[in-house]
Image (spheres, rainbow, N blue to C red):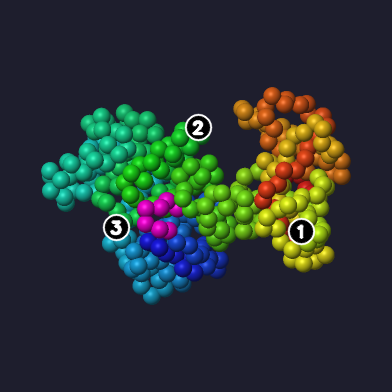
Amino acid sequence: MFLSVSQLKVRYTGSEQAAVQNVSFGLRAGDIGVLIGPSGCGKTTLLRAVAGLEPVSSGDIKLGGRTVSSATSHVPAEQRRIGMVFQDYALFPHLNVERNVAFGIHDMPSALRTERVAEVLAWVGLSDTSLRYPHELSGGQQQRVALARALAPKPQLLLLDEPFSNLDVDLRERLAHEVRGILKAAGATALFVTHDQLEAFAIGDMIGVMSDGTLHQWDDAYSLYHRPATRFVAEFIGHGVFAPATLVEVDGQTVVQTALGELSNIAECPLPSAFESGHCDVLLRADDIVHDDDAPVKAEILRKAFRGAEFLYTLRLAGGQIVQAHVPSHHDHRLGEWIGIRPQVDHVVTFKRHTESAADPS
């Protein structure tokens, strides 16, 4: 692994609670990693520790096999060859785009500096803006200038801290795709911090979900969604609810009994012995529930959120269990209406039974 973080703990002076505790993950050269989680979860502190801006209490950080942070050693930030892009871009308003990008490579010979500036501006699609000033650019263009400036010195690792947070929601995901393309074209290794799942999915090869200073899971987006390692990851990523279930064995196969009926022929389902009396909670994503007028199970529509091509329906079964379902938007049912639903679950994810599993997800 090019970036290796092992059992890392970061504790602020005077604080009994560690801001980051026992975090371990690895990032291969050329890959893009993303740290995601609610505000105050420790993701920016972790990023700052990697940058060399925060000392570590225990554990270590390695870059290219070299230890740059541990409890007993610390390589200064300026010696780590790390580039950073901040949420406010930190562009110099009195310098034009060309001079902003060249700022970090002023020691380079003039001809090579001019060539490098032209190269990175071409990567970010801003070759025609070199003589313009930051106030003459859109927010998205300013963000790309900041990215070009960070890439110009050829850093061995690029760190991005909420770089799209000041942009419109619609622009964020599109720009995340663009930035991914730029980083891949540059062959850059990058670690990115965001609280936005769509940004994380759009840009990341690997995504780490954090809460209360702990890294719950470091995985690709598909695995985070379909195979969450903890209950927190299951709740944080995507839409879904936990439904009480019982695992039983029928003809040598595990069957999951739920209020929606039996789920069977499921790969990777745990044995009934994994839980006391087989009782557990099963994660039901909104895309696990199919609207079917002919289904024997009916549910009342409590809420609906229009998403363009589909509605996100929040539904209540006769027994009180709450589920959610993505339904094509031409099925525009009224609140309070009862509709038929059936489960279509390809990935069964179970957790220890929780007494509030049937609660309304609002």
x and y percent of residue 145 in the render?
32, 39
Are the two marked residues, 1 and 2, in contact with CB atoms closer than 8 angstroms? no
Instruction: Name the residue carrying label 1.
Output: 254
Identify residue type, mark 3.
Arg
First along the sequence among labels 1 and 2: 2
In the rendered structure, does residue 200 fall within the stretch colored magenta?
A: no
Are the two marked residues, 3 and 1, in contact with CB atoms closer than 8 angstroms? no
Residue shown at 78% from the left, 62% from the top: 252
Residue 173 marker:
none
Residue shown at 67% from the left, 41% from the top: 287
Identify residue type, mark 2.
Asp
Residue 81 marker:
3
Q: Residues within 10 Å of mark 3 (few under 14, many from 20)?
A: some
First along the sequence among labels 3 and 1: 3
Residue shown at 52% from the left, 62% from the top: 19
What's drawn in magenta, residue-wise?
A: 27-33
Q: Secondary structure at mark 2?
A: helix
* Disc 3 from disc 2: Cα separation: 33 Å
